[in-house]
Image (cartoon, grey):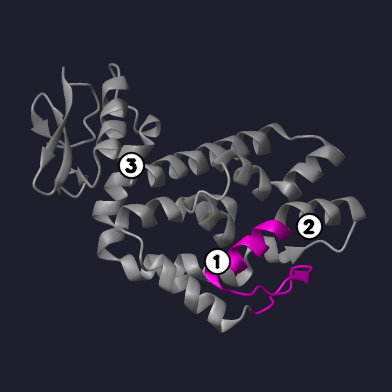
Amino acid sequence: MSTWARKRFWKTVDVAETPAGFAVHLDGRGIKTPAKSPLVVPTRAMARLIADEWQAQEQDIRPDTMPATRAANAALDKVRVQFDEVAALLVAYGETDLLCYRADGPKELVTRQSAAWDPLLDWSAARFGVAWAVTEGVMPTPQPAETLRKLAAHVAGFTAFELTAFHDLVAMSGSLVIALAVTEGHAPPETLWQVSRIDEDWQIDQWGEDDDAAATAARRRQAFLDAARFFAVCH
């Protein structure tokens, strides 16, 4: 049974425990991923989240309203079969982490960045036993090899489902540190999203907000929060 039928064809949506985990059943039949693997997830909470998305569909199925389903599909069809490559890609963000590249002016922006970003770098340094090289401008500055090695070891401990969520947390924020802070419950996801927007919000304060940019930012924010929720239900 394809998960991406164009019209709603089911009446009931249920969560069922199986020997391999938790499945979502439509009219008693298990959902499959686009690659035809059984959509079986590690926790009841995740299955319930997915089931709620399917229950909320009306006449037409709208995949854009089903972020947990999409994430579970990605974890099973893509991430688990290329886990090492995805993990390495995400750790590489640490080489150019948003929080490590600071403006050299104006003073107000410099102050905002320091106030928001320094505490997160300090937290990550203490939590993971790492050090960060912080610079002004956009010219690449190498990070200590030991920092990247330790963070790679931590990320390697994620499950495929966790890594799927982590991917979006990193990609949407532009920061390995911010994404790690979400996964560690260091601060609310909404707060951490705002931390990632220091530069953009300063520009808006100076010049106003462009409608297209605002729409893009809203989509990215929702993707970030959806990823934070998906990570939470991995446990």
Question: Which residue, as the protein is rendered here, is positioned at the far right?
Answer: 107
Say if the magenta span includes residue 12.
no
Residue under the point 63% across and 75% down: 131
Residue under label 1, please give it. Answer: 93
Q: Position of residue 179 (x, y in %)?
A: 53, 55
Q: Earlier in the sequence, mark 2 or mark 3?
A: 3
Q: Is residue 221 above or below residue 15?
A: below
Q: Earlier in the sequence, mark 1 or mark 3?
A: 3
Q: Position of residue 175 (x, y in %)?
A: 59, 58
Residue 57 visible in rendering: no
Residue under label 2, please give it. Answer: 114
Mark 3 element type = helix
Residue under label 3, please give it. Answer: 70
Q: Position of residue 233 (x, y in %)?
A: 35, 42
Q: Nearer the viewer, mark 2 or mark 3?
A: 2
Label 3 neighbourhood size at 10 Å, few (<14), some (14-19), many (20+)? Answer: some
Q: Position of residue 16 (x, y in %)?
A: 13, 34
The mark found on residue 45 in the picture is none
Q: Is residue 127 above or below residue 174?
A: below
Q: Nearer the viewer, mark 2 or mark 1?
A: 2
Residue under the point 74% across and 68% down: 138
- Give the amino acid at mark 1: Tyr
- Give the amino acid at mark 2: Ser
Please state the extent of the stretch shown in magenta in the rendering: 118-142
Left of 81 or right of it: where is 145? right
Q: Is residue 92 above or below residue 161?
A: below
- Give the amino acid at mark 3: Arg
